[in-house]
Amino acid sequence: MKKLRIGMIGAGFLGHFQAIAMKQVRNMELAGVFSLKGAEELSRFARDNELGKAKVYPNIAEMAKNVDAVAIYCPNYTRIAIMEEIVAAVKAGAELKGVICEKPLGRNVAEARKLVKLAESVNLRTAYFENQIHMKPIRIQMAQLAPQQRTMGPLTLTRSAEEHGGPHEGWFWDPTRQGGGVLCDMGCHSIAVGWYTLTPLGKDLTFLQPYRVSADLGLLKWGQPKWREKLLKDRGVDYSKTPAEDFATGMITYKNPETKQLVKAQFTNSWMFEKQGLRLSMDGMGPGYAFEINTLISPLTIFIGDAAAEAVADQEAALEKATASRGLLSVHHNEADLYGYTDENIDAADAFLAGKDAFLNWRYGLEITKLVMAAYMAAEKGCTLDLTNAAVQKELEKYVPAIQQGHGADQLFAKK
């Protein structure tokens, strides 16, 4: 069986999580790693788990010559420079079948569009990694409710949320490097899965037309003095000067171009979630039917008392982004598969080996970036944006949120 040899750029939390997912993919191997830090550790993990040779390369150009596809898992603010190196390697003779980019595609529309153009300049196939659309519970509910959709009509309301206690690394918290706060980091997930689940059976990903968007942002936990001090001490980011939102919620209205029916997708995201750990929750309502997903409902729960917790404190052994090591804990035996990482890798491998774009390509990633930026703009202006307005679309092309520029204090702190 032919395998897709992946060269991974970035060896942080995401790189390791994707490597865990790759253990469950038959036609993919980790052939190379390039990262400024952590490359040797990730390479060793790959070899120990028979994922591939995972050779550590000194630069992107050298790695690109020895792999089939490159996966960009490095920080958001490095993406364009990294992609320019990949394009240069292809022009120099590297025979890549495709390139993967983890969400978000860009910190703003201009960046996302530039990445699309860079890939297209050398005819590279692309995969936009949005794992939640690949979640088995999402796909299975769609298959299970297909008869109801055909008989009663498609869903008209979806609600999607991703919440946890905050990111692992300092750059995620820095809005000037990450692109914003929780809306940029996780809102892209919830917006994408909401749009996807509303889409009628058999229609293209972008069949439903974005119509209106409203949003509200808040700094509810990490702006308080005690937590600002902890963030500065632990992550080196000063939210008294350059804060980002730790809570975001909003509504996107879409229009069905055939029936003219308006449907709605609500999104909610936070870095201030104080329960077991990462929670993904989605539900949807159609005429006479519904679905609901909550990843904290696990078939396995464990209890750890105070004495036992003092002996072993490994919060994330149970659940990603867990904030507690004692009490009643939800445990998932296969998080990479539950959250859709396994299936997005399977899709990319199958597509690239067949000479095609993945199910979600970078053009789709650009559309998600537009919607995220539209939500920031709506919150900043304090209004509901008309997404059918040509002037709004033109403004979005160059728009950079105030929070991303480092001016979040004006929006997130109370004005005296």
Image (spheres, helix red, strand yellow):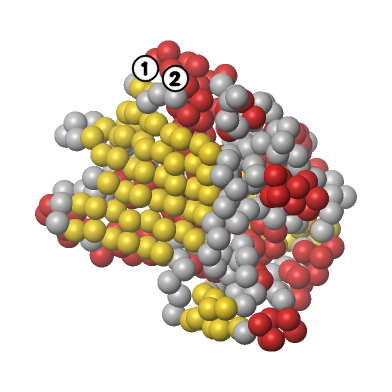
Measuring 74% from the left and 69% from the top, which residue is drawn there?
46
What residue is at 52 percent from the left and 54 percent from the top? 163
Residue at 46% x, 68% y: name it: 296
Residue 307 marker: none
Q: Residues within 10 Å of mark 1 (few under 14, many from 20)?
A: few
Q: Nearer the viewer, residue 373 or 113?
A: 373
Tag 1 residue: 389
Q: In the image, is 263 to the left or to the right of 18?
A: left
Q: State the image coordinates of residue 50 (x, y, percent, origin top left).
A: 71, 74
> Which of the two residues, 17 or 320, is positioned nearer the viewer here?
320
Q: Quadrant of the N terminus?
A: bottom right
- How many neighbours does mark 2 have within 10 angstroms: few (below 14), some (14-19), or many (20 or more)? some
Distance (Cα) linking label 2 and label 1: 7 Å
Secondary structure at badge 1 equals loop
Residue furthest out toward the left = 151
Residue 193 in the image: state x and y as whole percent: 41, 49
Q: What residue sits right under mark 2 in the picture?
A: 393
Q: Quadrant of the C terminus?
A: top right
Q: Do the CB atoms of the residues marked 2 and 1 lie less than 8 Å apart? A: yes
Please report the residue visible at 54 percent of the width from the left and 83 percent of the height from the top.
302
Q: Identity of the amino acid at label 2? A: Gln
Disc 2 element: helix
Q: Position of residue 16 (x, y in %)?
A: 69, 63
- Residue 342 in view here: no
Which residue of the protein is positioned furthest toward the right in this rendering? 58
Based on the displayed image, in which of its 4 quarters is residue 48 positioned?
Answer: bottom right
Residue 173 in view: yes
Farthest residue to the top: give it.
Answer: 391
Q: Amino acid at mark 1?
A: Asn
Query: Which residue is more in the foreground, 29 or 282?
Result: 282
Provide residue 277's location: percent of width, then percent of height.
56, 64
Relative to 98, does residue 164 appear above or below in the rendering? below
